[in-house]
Amino acid sequence: MDRAVFEAIVAQAMLAPSAHNTQPARWRLDGACIEVHVDLSRRLPIGDPDNRDLYVSCGAAVEGTVLALAARGFGADVTLMEAPVEAGLRIIARIVPKTTADTGDVVLAKEVSKRLTHRAGFIPAPQEAFRNWRADHMTLVQDASQIEWLAGQIDIASARVMRSRDFRSELLHWMRLREGDPNYHTDGLNREVLAMDAATARIAPPILGGRLYDLLSFLGLGPHLSGEAARSRGAGAIALFHWPESGSMVNAGRVFYRSWLQATARGLVGWPAAALADDPLTRADVSGRFSIPADRVLFNALRLGVANGATPSRTRLSVREVIV
């Protein structure tokens, strides 16, 4: 494979979403084969101790590679791997291009450049945007009262997770709240992506990093500090993603990304609500309420709707930084 073609494929593949925009996937060209590796230095040891989100993120990158090949007319044979760690990297997939692309992949690849995370809220979505959209790995919640309940649970779960000062410290490490931050336009979560005004951006670090947040949480104000419920209620639907507990989280990430791109094709934007899956108590409550089978694990959720305004631009590392 020509090096320029490989770099173009990676440039499209790396648009896949990742937890906290950590971008943990790395690519290597081995003859005609594309290898996808996980960079363990980009993991979240506090927020993601079991590496579930890490491998879901890298699974999305694997699917992004498949779709980038499809955009150029190639199919893909994907072999998942569990290899030892070498120099901080672990290969998770080998992708061998085929001569013919899947038609569905070619169509979906056109949505990659349009997909965005939108945290600023939604305007009412037409019901036809969700019509005839079902999948074994996804429970689509459209009832307004159930969305209201989930919106409250998102804030409760976030408050529980945020009680940990170590978690807040890790989150702050990936937040880019000053435009002078050298990583403001490359990775993590900047102020525009977070839909955060300048005043809040100035006070967020001392509050999150100090004892004031502990006091406010102790007083029961944690859910109010998260402040997402009002915007979450405006979602036209909330998709709950679940996968066999013994299954590969890489494959879970692949179907998660495809579903998000399908939502994009329907004119929708997404806003992850990973706290529903990250907090064990909330995960159990949500799984029970929506009859998610006991042998499947809720691994993410996605608020879906029509954007209520302009969406922020992406922040990404350079192509050269993710090729090893």
Image: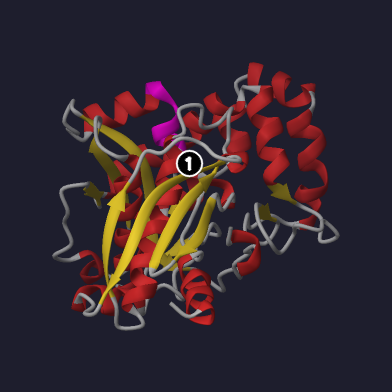
Check disc 1 and report the residue beneath it.
Answer: 54
**Left of 141 or right of it: where is 150?**
right
Element type where label 1 sits in the image = helix
Q: Position of residue 13 (x, y in %)?
A: 46, 67
* Residue 157 visible in the shown view: yes
**Left of 319 or right of it: where is 61?**
left
Q: Residue furthest top?
A: 218
Q: Position of residue 127 (x, y in %)?
A: 23, 67
Report crowding for label 1: few under 14, some 14 to 19, many 20 or more residues within 10 A (C-alpha).
Answer: many
Asked which quadrant contains residue 42, the reply is top right
Asked which quadrant contains residue 172, the reply is top right
Q: Position of residue 82 (x, y in %)?
A: 37, 38
**Up-down relation of residue 60 to residue 5 (above or below):** above
- Quadrant for the N terminus in the image: bottom left
Residue found at x 73% / y 57%: 197
Magenta run includes residue 139: no
Residue found at x 35% / y 46%: 250
Count of numbered labels shown in the rendering: 1
**What amino acid type should be assigned to the residue bearing mark 1?**
Leu
**Up-down relation of residue 310 to residue 157 (above or below):** below
- Magenta-highlighted residues: 275-281
Q: Residue furthest right?
A: 180
Name the one closer to the observer, 284 or 324: 324
Residue found at x 77% / y 50%: 201
